[in-house]
Image (cartoon, rainbow, N blue to C red):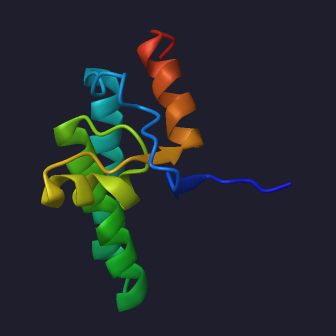
């Protein structure tokens, strides 16, 4: 059995093309995650880990600003640069977004 957490859609399909951009609550969570990763990047003393944390932080902030659905660290910045949606799948974020958008939080 193969488990995929974050991945690019290799078959060319876009699982979220019929979905609207993220709403305000999921965007706020993405923004908080991005800020948390940036704080972690500043706090880390070892440059490889701080660069990774900075990438996660920036990509989550871009996802929050653009309403990007999917895996922020893989597709949000690419979508912004290419000016088209780069489709990714991130099951943990999908589940969390559905929970937030249903009003349970």
Q: Name the residue at the front extreme.
A: 11
Residue drawn at x 86%, y 54% as measured from the top left: 1
Q: Position of residue 8 (x, y in %)?
A: 48, 56
Determine whether, in the image, residue 31 is placed left or right of residue 33.
Answer: left
Q: Across the whole image, how many numbered discs are drawn on residues?
A: 0
- Against 70, residue 104 (above or below) is above
The answer to whether one can see residue 46 in this image is: no
Q: Residue visible at 31% across and 51% down?
A: 60
Q: Residue at x 28, y 21 (%)?
A: 23
List x then y, in percent, for residue 69.
Answer: 37, 37
Q: Quadrant of residue 74?
A: bottom left
Residue 37 visible in the shown view: yes
- Give x and y (percent) for residue 38: 28, 63
Task: Between residue 69 and residue 86, name the one nearer to us.
Answer: 86
Q: Is residue 101 left or right of residue 85?
A: right
Q: In the displayed structure, would residue 103 be above or below residue 42?
A: above
Q: Nearer the viewer, residue 63 or 12?
A: 12
Residue at 17 percent of width and 40 percent of height: 65
| Picture coordinates of residue 44, whole percent (x, y) | 38, 79
Please determine whether, in this image, residue 28 is positioned above or below residue 24.
below
Report which quarter residue 31 is drawn in.
top left
Is residue 21 positioned above or below 76 on the image? above
- Check the image and name the residue furthest to the top: 103
């Amino acid at each position: 059995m193969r488990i995929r957490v974050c991945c690019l859609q290799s078959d060319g399909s876009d699982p979220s093309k019929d979905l609207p951009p993220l709403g305000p609550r999921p965007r706020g969570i993405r923004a908080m995650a991005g800020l948390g990763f940036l704080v972690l990047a500043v706090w880390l003393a070892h440059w490889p880990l701080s660069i990774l944390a900075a990438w996660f932080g920036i990509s989550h902030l871009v996802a929050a600003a653009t309403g990007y659905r999917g895996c922020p660290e893989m597709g949000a910045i690419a979508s912004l640069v290419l000016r088209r949606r780069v489709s990714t799948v991130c099951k943990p974020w999908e589940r969390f977004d559905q929970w937030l958008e249903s009003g349970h939080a």
